[in-house]
Amino acid sequence: MRNRSCSSILGVFFLTIAVSAATVPESPVADAAMRSDIETMRNLLYQGADVNAAQGDGMTALHWAAVNGQPEMSEM
């Protein structure tokens, strides 16, 4: 019984470490599009940022341009 409890606690501990170590993908262009910040988007794209980089939920700059009704963003 004691070994099973210890194993369960260790399992939860390692699972917690694994989940906390997962990183959120960087998507500055999508973040700017989410805020409808066209100027920041332009600057990021000029600097070579990936326009197709998705946020953690899969949303890209193109998705946000459509959601926010920003046709100018979708043409960048």
Image (cartoon, rainbow, N blue to C red):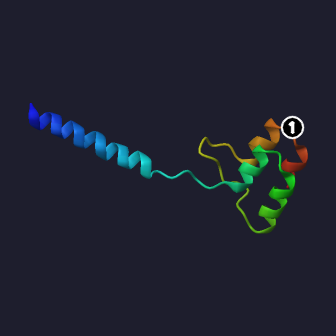
Q: Which residue is at the front of the view, 10 or 60?
A: 10
Q: Residue at x 18, y 40 (%)?
A: 7
Quick one: label 1, few (<14), some, or many (20+) residues within 10 Å? few
Q: Which residue is at the front of the view, 34 or 59?
A: 34
Mark 1 falls on what kind of element?
loop
- The residue most toward the right is 72
Q: Residue at x 84, y 60 (%)?
A: 42
Q: Which residue corresponds to mark 1?
A: 69
Q: Is residue 47 above or below residue 9?
A: below
| Residue type beneath disc 1 | Gly
- The residue most toward the top is 1
Q: Quadrant of residue 52?
A: bottom right
Q: Residue at x 33, y 43 (%)?
A: 15
Rendering coords of residue 64 (x, y %): 77, 42
Rendering coords of residue 54 (x, y %): 65, 49
Rendering coords of residue 4 (x, y %): 14, 34
Relative to 26, 11 lies left or right: left
Relative to 34, 12 lies left or right: left
The C terminus - image quarter: bottom right
Q: Quadrant of residue 56?
A: top right
Q: Is residue 5 above or below residue 42?
A: above
Relative to 60, 9 lies left or right: left
Number of marks drawn: 1
Q: Residue at x 83, y 45 (%)?
A: 36
The N terminus - image quarter: top left
- The residue most toward the bottom is 47
Relative to 55, 40 lies left or right: right
